[in-house]
Image: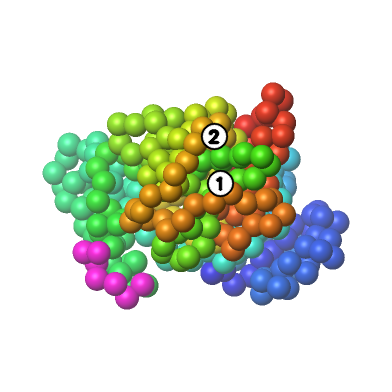
Amino acid sequence: MYDYLYIDIDLQDNITDNIQKIFLENNIKFKFVAEIDSVLKNILFLTSNKNKITENCRTIFLLDRDYDLLDCKGSYYIKNIEDIVKIYNKDIIVEWAAEIQFLAQNTLAYSKDKFDLERAERLREISCEMLSYKYKTNSETIKHIFANEVGYQTPKLENRAAIIKDNKILLVKEKSDNRWALPGGYQDVNKSIKDNVIKECGEEAGAVVKPIKIVSLLDYNKHHNYNFPLGMLKIIVLCEYISHDFKYNIETEDSNFFDFHNLPELSTTRTTFEQIQMCFDCYNNLDNWEVIFD
């Protein structure tokens, strides 16, 4: 978590009363400055001026156009000021550990120098030890979850199915938290997106479906309160309903259709209200729907 947010004084008009309320609710301390002229530790600086991006602290760049991110190397970038909340509350140790693991794994994948390989292996161990210390979990458990892959480090991939019938959406009740979510899960090896969606719907909801359209391709960490250290991409797929017959399984304990205005308690690490709304918007505007992606 960062200690303070400095905001470019040129953005003063952008910090509305509503934004200030959000900052207050999330304990974000902020002040306006003209520039950052010295090295500051654990400070964020928000600007929309590329010429003010600085190495003196961590910069957040407010995008005007998507492709502006090409000029933001080494900086965070956001489209909406309220997105600062997630960055401000980020755990820096987890972020450092993830970057160390990323660099170490790529070195292990591509270097031929034995000394580089030894150093990379030790850096990978350090990244696991950092998380072990933070979460009070043994490093072998952390390594299994966090550093057990080979090759270039990439984010995980999850897909979820939007199955709508008679203006109601099919949800499954998760055994892990007794809350409801769109059926889906991690992308399996050697399966296409379509195949994986069909499989997950069958396993979790007992549903037979035909995937017909991508609703969205989202950066999971931007839309959920839980953060994957190495990131995850989330694909939501609109499916044509054929039939369903729920059967006992190890992940879910029920499946049912729900009206948009009468949704059950959601398993928000899997599915949010905004994502369900997005699914209905796509369903009701199928021919003109443009995929939403981060």
Q: How far apart are labels 1 and 2 at the CA level?
A: 9 Å
Left or right relative to 292: residue 226 = left
Where the C terminus falls, by quadrant? top right
Q: Is residue 148 visible?
A: yes
Q: Are marks 1 and 2 in contact (CB under 8 Å)?
A: yes
Residue 175 located within the stretch drawn in magenta: no
Residue shown at 27% from the left, 39% from the top: 151
- Up the image or down, 49 lies above or below 20; here it is above
At x 41%, y 62%, the residue is 175
From the top left corner, tell me how far across and down residue 229 is, in percent.
42, 56
Q: Tell me the element at label 2.
A: strand
Which numbered disc, 1 or 2, marks the residue that appears first in the sequence?
1
Residue to which mark 2 is pinned? 241
**Disc on res. 170:** 1
Tag 1: amino acid: Leu
User: How far from the left and from the top, in percent, is residue 75?
Assistant: 57, 49
Query: Mark on residue 70?
Result: none
Residues drawn in magenta = 135-141
Residue 18 in the image, given as x and y percentages of width and height: 81, 64
| Along the line of sight, the residue nearer the viewer: 35 or 127 | 127
